């Protein structure tokens, strides 16, 4: 599935916090957004037609000026008031979004607020109603997250609320590294390096023994260059990387929980995941014992890898 700019859906930019931790919210695709918009516009058109018919029946004795004023008020109420109130009360949903499992959120992942809903509705008067949706269509096609002009004005985006989950990319904290990880300095770890570590751990079972070793040591050395203090002696690269990612996720989830607690209308998402505390998630891949490798920066070499003790395959735990 392609994003509005044409790249695969899996390559769409996920929401990332200020600490470069990826949130589990995926931008809605162009086709899904357009389908939701069509539902919302259809509801509003039907409401407008019914309101005008009701006014013509009830206010048949009114003069033309009064009728025009009432019709204008009804248009403003349906086009601006309805979406603003509905999205504010439902925390970012409209009828179309409810039907398709979408939600409007702030670009930082926070729930949509009244001023944001109002900004989107006012912008829709121009980009959707005045220009028949052409402006919204072009804007959504020209940016990676499919945001329309109203989203840029309000600082929002539409995300999948019921998106199919990808394979779990959270990892359990290795118990022997929990104390070290809590005191580690992780602020210099970039999202790119963390992403490399995450992909390595997720693909660990698909790699050959030699690739596990060479890639693991290379990525662990990149991480250890910006994370301090170094891990305990004898720590295997997969366990080290899993500990860093688990601690990074735990700290960010704590910050997000504190932020949600301070927002009165934040939707309930639960606390820190079990993987962040070492009680769940994907275990760190197994790494057999072996002698220290001089080129590995202190990380032990596995059996079958350069410097290892044997050539047996060791599947991840």
Image (cartoon, helix red, strand yellow):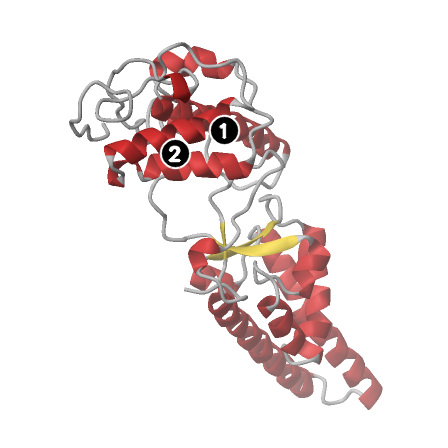
Q: Is residue 148 above or below residue 226?
A: below
Q: Is residue 211 above or below residue 151?
A: above
Q: Position of residue 297 (x, y in %)?
A: 44, 18
Q: Quadrant of the N terminus?
A: bottom left
- Residue, far left: 312
Mark 1 burial class by Cα count in 10 Å: few <14, some 14-19, many 20+: some
SS at badge 2? loop
In front here: 273 or 54?
Answer: 273
The part of the image, by quadrant, that contains residue 317 is top left
Q: Position of residue 42 (x, y in %)?
A: 54, 77
In front here: 2 or 75?
Answer: 2
In front here: 258 or 89?
Answer: 258
Q: Earlier in the sequence, mark 2 or mark 1?
A: 2
The part of the image, by quadrant, that contains residue 70 is bottom right
The part of the image, by quadrant, that contains residue 225 is top right
Q: Position of residue 263 (x, y in %)?
A: 63, 36
Residue denoted by label 2: 170
Q: CA distance from mark 2 to mark 1?
A: 20 Å
């Amino acid at each position: 599935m392609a994003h509005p700019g044409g790249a695969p859906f899996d390559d769409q930019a996920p929401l990332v916090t200020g600490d470069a931790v990826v949130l589990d919210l995926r931008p809605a695709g162009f086709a899904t957004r357009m389908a939701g918009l069509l539902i919302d516009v259809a509801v509003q058109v039907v409401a407008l037609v019914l309101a005008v018919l009701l006014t013509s029946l009830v206010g048949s004795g009114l003069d033309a000026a009064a009728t025009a004023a009432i019709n204008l008020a009804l248009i403003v109420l349906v086009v601006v008031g309805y979406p603003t109130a509905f999205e504010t009360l439902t925390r970012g949903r409209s009828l179309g979004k409810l039907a398709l499992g979408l939600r409007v959120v702030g670009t930082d992942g926070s729930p949509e607020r009244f001023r944001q809903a109002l900004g989107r509705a006012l912008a829709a008067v121009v980009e959707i109603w005045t220009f028949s949706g052409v402006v919204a269509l072009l804007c959504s096609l020209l940016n990676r997250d499919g945001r329309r002009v109203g989203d840029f004005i309000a600082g929002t985006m539409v995300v999948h609320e019921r998106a199919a989950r990808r394979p779990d990319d959270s990892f359990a904290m290795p118990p022997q590294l929990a104390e070290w990880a809590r005191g580690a300095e992780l602020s210099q770890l970039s999202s790119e390096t963390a992403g490399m570590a995450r992909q390595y751990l997720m693909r660990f079972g698909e790699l050959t023994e030699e690739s596990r070793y060479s890639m693991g040591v290379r990525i662990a050395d990149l991480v250890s260059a910006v994370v301090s203090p170094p891990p305990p002696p004898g720590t295997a690269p997969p366990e080290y990387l899993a500990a860093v990612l688990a601690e990074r996720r735990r700290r960010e989830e704590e910050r997000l929980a504190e932020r949600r607690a301070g927002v009165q209308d934040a939707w309930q998402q639960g606390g820190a995941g079990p993987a962040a505390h070492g009680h769940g998630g994907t275990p760190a891949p197994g790494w057999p014992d072996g002698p220290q490798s001089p080129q590995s920066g202190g990380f032990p070499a596995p059996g079958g890898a350069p410097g290892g003790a044997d050539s047996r395959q060791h599947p991840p735990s």
